[in-house]
Structures are given as C-alpha cells and as structure tokens.
Amino acid sequence: MAHTTDRGRQRPTRRSKPTPRRRPTARRRLRRETPSTVAVLADERAFAAMRRYRTFHFDDHATYLRQVESLLRSLAARGTHTSVALFDPARYEEYCADSHLDPDTAAGRTRYTADVAATGTRITYDGRPLAHLLTELVDEAEQQATWEHASALLTRDGDCASCGEDIGRAAFARASHLLRRLVETAGRGSHHLVCSVHGEQGHGPLVAVLHATCTDDGLLHLGEAAALVFCTVLAAGIAADRAGGVVLRTTRPGQRESVRGWCLDGGDLRPLTEAEVFSAYCTDARTGEPVPPEHGVDYRAGVPLDEEGTE
C-alpha cells in the first residue's frame, strides 16, 4: 500500500519486518545434549565439614537442599539429563591432596564432582523429591562400599595350600549356590534376606540386603546388583570362616509372616533351630535383654540347604 505526500508524490509505506523466531543457538543445543551431575551434601555432618571453606557460600543445610532441588528442576526443565551423587568431604579432601588442588575453590569441587560422576555411585534425577532420592542414593552407596570391602577380602585370600584352588572364587561359587537354595526353600511369596558377616577388627559388620519375589508360576524376580553384593558378602564369610549368618523373612498374602535363620559355621550355612531363631530375634543385641516377639510373625527353624525341595 502507498500514500500521497504533500507534493503529490507517492512513496511506499514502510512495512515493519516480521519478527524472526528465535531459534536455539548451536551452543544452547549442545548444552541440552550435555549431561550434568550434581553432587549433594546429604546430611548435616557433611554440610558442616564443608563450611570451613571460605568459598562455600551456604550457612544452612535446609536452605542448601532447597537450592539443590531447585537446580535439579531447572536442569530437567531444559531437557538436561542429570544425575545425583553424594559429595563426601573426607574423600574430597583426599582427592584434592592427591591431585594437588586447593580444596577451597569452586574449581576443586567441580573436578571432584566430575570424578564422582565417572567412578562413584549416582542415580538419575527423575523428578522425585530430593529427600527420596538421597535415601536411595545413600543405600546404594553403602551397598557399593560393602561390595568393595567384601571383594577386597576375597581377592586377598589367594589359593588353597592343599589343593591350589582359588579360595575366593570357590567361596563365591558356594555362596551363589546357597543363595539359589535359600530362594528355592522360601518358595512363593515376597522374601527379605539379610546376610551379616563380621568384618575385620576396627570395622563394622558387612551387611547385604536382598529382596526377592517368587510368583505362583515359579518366576523369580530379584535385583542382580543386590544379589551380587549378597553373594560377595556371604563368600567373604565362607572363605575366612567368619562369624555371621542369614535371616530370611517371607510374606504371603493372607498368611502370617515367617522368619528363618542360618549361621555361618565351618565355612557353610548351618540351619538354626526354631528356639535359636526366636532367641536371636527376641534378644536385644546391645544389652542382651529379652524383647517381645513381633506380632503376627512365626519363628521357624532353618532347613538344610543342600536338601532339595521347597515348602
């Protein structure tokens, strides 16, 4: 469209150019495709340890966690794949010393986080509340540490002096067989297994937890990673004839829960009697005082694990 000037000449009307759509820059697109890891100080003790650094600008743990959760949500909103890991101040200090880094710098914390992302325990941020993620993360980190400790005990046992067999390898094979027999013995239902083995002097016990479900059609469901930890801990007890044992709790719809137990004896699992299982569960481990039995739970004897057959 044109309009007339005072002198009768026409000139074209200026048209505003359409506003171009803002397209994401190449850098922004790359940022979306770059994964991120956020290392979190999970508890008050870890948070307090980091506060001695001048460049750590947080004064309150609850506020810090809220800021971390806000960061996780913002990264997810951008489409960034984000993992959550634990920030361990003691390991951080060791890492900085080994790497000749100043721990009182953001650069030091960033490099440590990158190392944790590559070698440590982490889980994917999936939108759940941070408190739930941290509970799962702490559990996984503890299981990882347990597996590493038990593996170290196994690998140092060497070969049998009389037969030349690798002691750790043989113990692990035996532990795997015993786990299979434990689950077969339990039969259908949901099963909670706990293996506890005395650690070295100065260390607490090695504890592995495994959840398994056996359906009516015989299908077995269990976590492979948890089963690996369970077998490694049990093998560490078998290889060195350490004190320890296994407890199996079974739940079935419409039935009372049952608890069975076995103790490590001579490098193998010996079934406990019903009285021994009852005594173990109904005695305070710290004081030795009796405690009331759980309501709705039957304490049953363990069964020999080299005998075939299920309940």
Image (cartoon, grey):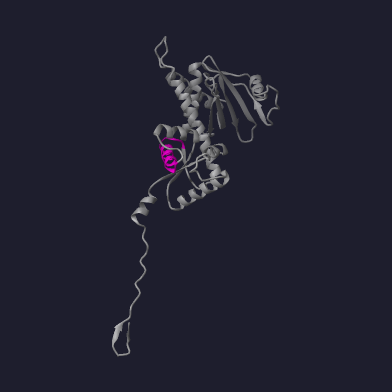
User: x, y (%) of residue 156?
Assistant: 43, 19
User: x, y (%) of residue 197?
Assistant: 54, 22
In the rendered image, residue 279 lying in the magenta stretch gets the answer: no
What secondary structure is the magenta-colored segment mainly? helix
Q: Which residue: 45% across, 50% down? A: 75
Quadrant location of the C terminus in the rendered image: top right
Q: Which residue: 36% across, 60% down? A: 23
Quadrant location of the N terminus in the rendered image: bottom left
Q: Which residue: 41% across, 31% down? A: 98
Which residue is nearer to you in this view: 33 or 90? 90
User: x, y (%) of residue 17?
Assistant: 34, 72
Which residue is nearer to you in this view: 304 or 121? 121
Q: Is residue 148 left or right of residue 293?
A: left
Q: Is the residue 5 above or below the residue 17 in the image?
A: below
Q: Which residues are magenta?
A: 105-121
Which residue is nearer to you in this view: 118 or 187? 118
User: x, y (%) of residue 135?
Assistant: 55, 39
The number of numbered badges drawn on the structure is 0
Q: Quadrant of residue 8?
A: bottom left
Asked whether residue 254 is in view, the answer is yes
Q: Is the residue 163 above or below the residue 49 in the image?
A: above
